[in-house]
Amino acid sequence: MSAAVLQFIDESVGGEMLRDHEVRLGSAETVRVRELLQLRFGDNAATACDDFTRGALRLQVAGAHIDSLDAPIDLVPGLAVKLIRLVPAAEH
C-alpha cells in the first residue's frame, strides 16, 4: 500500500496561488480539520485554527467547503486541500 500524499494549495481570496506543496503520510486515515491544519502549519497550527474559527482562512477539501474544526476528513492518496486566505495571517 502506498503512502497517502496530500496536496496543499494556498490561495488568496482572488484565486492567486500563494503556495503549493505535498505532505506524505504513512497511511490513509481519517483526521479532524484541526489535525489537518497541524499537518500543514506545524508549530503555527494554533494560529491557523484561530484564523479558521474567525473566518480569516477558508478550507476546501476535494472541492467541498469545510466549516468546522471538528469535521472528519478522510486522508486518501491524491487528496487536494485548498486553503484560502481571506485576510493576512496574524503576526505572532
Image: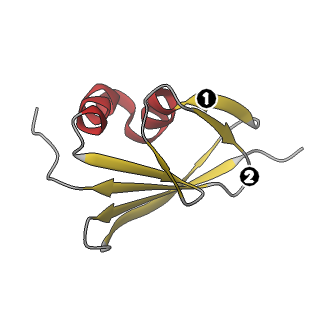
For the N terminus, the quadrant is top right
Residue 15 picture location, percent across and down: 32, 73
Quarter in which the C terminus is drawn: top left
What is the x, y in percent for residue 29?
A: 72, 32
Q: Quadrant of residue 72?
A: top right
| Callout 2 secondary element | loop
Question: Percent x, y for residue 20?
Answer: 44, 63
Sequence-wise first label, 2 or 1: 1
What residue do we see at 53% from left, 31% from top?
Answer: 71
Position of residue 78 relative to residue 59, above or below, is below
State how far apart marks 2 and 1 are (Cα).
14 Å
Residue found at the far right of this picture = 1
Which residue lies under the disc numbered 2?
A: 77
x and y percentages locating residue 53 in the rendered image: 28, 32
Local crowd size for mark 2, using a 10 Å CA cut-off: few (<14), some (14–19), many (≥20): some
Residue type at the position of mark 1: Val
Determine which residue is flagged by label 1: 31
Residue shown at 29% from the left, 36% from the top = 48
